[in-house]
Amino acid sequence: MSNQESHERRGLIRWAVRRFVAVYYPRIEIVDADLISQTQPVLLCANHGNSLIDPVIIGIAARRPVRFMAKAPLFDHPVLGPPMSALGMIPAYRGSDDAKQVRRNLESLDVGAKVLVDGHAMGIFPEGKSTDQAHLEMIRSGAARMAIQAAEDGAKGVQVVPMGIAYERKEQFRSSVLVRIAQPIDIDELLQQHNGDSRRARNALTAELETRMKQVVVHLEDPAWEPWLDDLEILVPPLTDADRTLGRLLWQRKHIADAMNYFLKQDRARAESIASAIEEYRHQLAATGLRINSTILQMSSLKAFLLLTWNLLWLVLFLLPAMFGTVYHIIPFVLVRQIASRMDQPGRLTISTHRLLVGVPIYLIWYAAVTLGLLFYEPRIAWAALIAAPFTGLVAVYYWRRARQTIVLLYHEMRLLFGLTELKKLRQQKSELQQRLGKLADDYAHLTKP
């Protein structure tokens, strides 16, 4: 097969993969995408928390073809290997995978540098591993080696572009993604600053890359405080910037993480005092069967009742399409969950990747099989069912989520019907916590104001 044919085939595969991921994550907010050059050689460096989905998100943000490095053992995976090879990904040999193969990593870096020399875009995850945690691991020197080697091999205008990717809930279908892009690092300027000393330039680039990535990723300097992040997202007053509506919750998470880093360094006693108050509040909620994110705590009793009434009405109105979507998709849904779960690694690193890799072929086969079966019975029913199936499937997804939320809300409403005094006390305690956190947020905004 010629290089041109291979490139065209890879472009088609790349387009299809990006479309499938865009369906899984329909709300992808990209901030400062214009910082990624469309003509110069660029090395895109991002945090890595979502298996093979991260490269696709980077490609969507870059708006141009991007080649990636991935750990070598994945290429031997029966499900992950073929699409990775088809997309032109480059194996990276890490000492943690096989100490005997680590020297081959230099060969992989050479291949990546050649991509930059040819004027293309290259992607890399400079932490050297994927993680579920909300902090940036130590940045390895591989990205700097690749970029500087490309410049020394004749590439002009190489830029290293730090990126941060945040997922609302990376394992959840139809959730949001926020991609933030930091100011690029010009390699020609960096080498000039260090008089062409590649070793000094490499060390400086690695340090600067880490600094700029921390500016755009959700990063906690002290990982031990990560369990507090979810609680603070609920308790801290939300951001109100109208331009951030798509990724509002993700902007909130980033803002909270930055504030936590600041106060843990500058006023740890104050941070620990509020943490103790949240812990006490959490225990009191647990004693009543509630959690910090329980709907009944987010609004007054009247609003909770109105929401419950509206949800029940919504569930009645959409019952028939939701039931059709559920019945139509129940077999492929169960198959995908069962097969994908057996492939998942611990944590949430690979859930969405495996569901997509397993789900796409299973759903396509299922749609084809049901349509063919119905064609023998009644063609009009077959085509009507095929057209309606995707839409009713989405209705079913939202329907059962809302049904679960409604059942929980109804349970809490009934349980606390005769405990209004206790509920009022919990709401008051929450209000006091929010006031303290709001003051902390105001102080942080004032102290860090440019």
Image (cartoon, grey):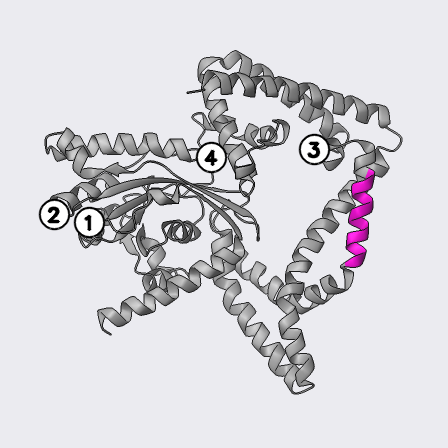
User: Between disc 3 and disc 2, whose residue precedes?
Assistant: 2
Q: Give the residue pinned by disc 4.
A: 134
For the record, the magenta segment spans: 305-317
Q: Is residue 401 magenta?
A: no
Image side of residue 26 versus residue 195, left or right: right
User: Between disc 4 and disc 1, whose residue precedes?
Assistant: 1
Q: CA distance from mark 1 to mark 3?
A: 50 Å
Q: CA distance from mark 4 to mark 2?
A: 36 Å
Of residues 9 and 143, the one nearer the viewer is 9
Report x, y in % for residue 73. Answer: 33, 54
Image side of residue 96 versus residue 249, left or right: left
Label drawn at residue 290: none
Question: Please, what is the three-letter code of the amino acid marked with disc 2?
Answer: Asp
| Residue 425 image-quadrant placement | top right
Q: Give the residue pinned by disc 1.
A: 113
Q: Is residue 316 magenta?
A: yes
User: Between disc 4 and disc 3, whose residue precedes?
Assistant: 4
Q: Which of pointers 4 and 1 indicates the residue nearer the eye?
A: 1
Secondary structure type for disc 2:
loop
Label drawn at residue 153: 2
| Category of crowding for the residue at label 4, using alpha-carbon neighbours closer than 10 angstroms: few (below 14), some (14–19), many (at least 20) | many
Of residues 324 and 227, the one nearer the viewer is 324
| Category of crowding for the residue at label 3, using alpha-carbon neighbours closer than 10 angstroms: few (below 14), some (14–19), many (at least 20) | some
| Residue 143 image-quadrant placement | top left
Residue 268 seen in the figure: yes
User: Between disc 2 and disc 1, whose residue precedes?
Assistant: 1
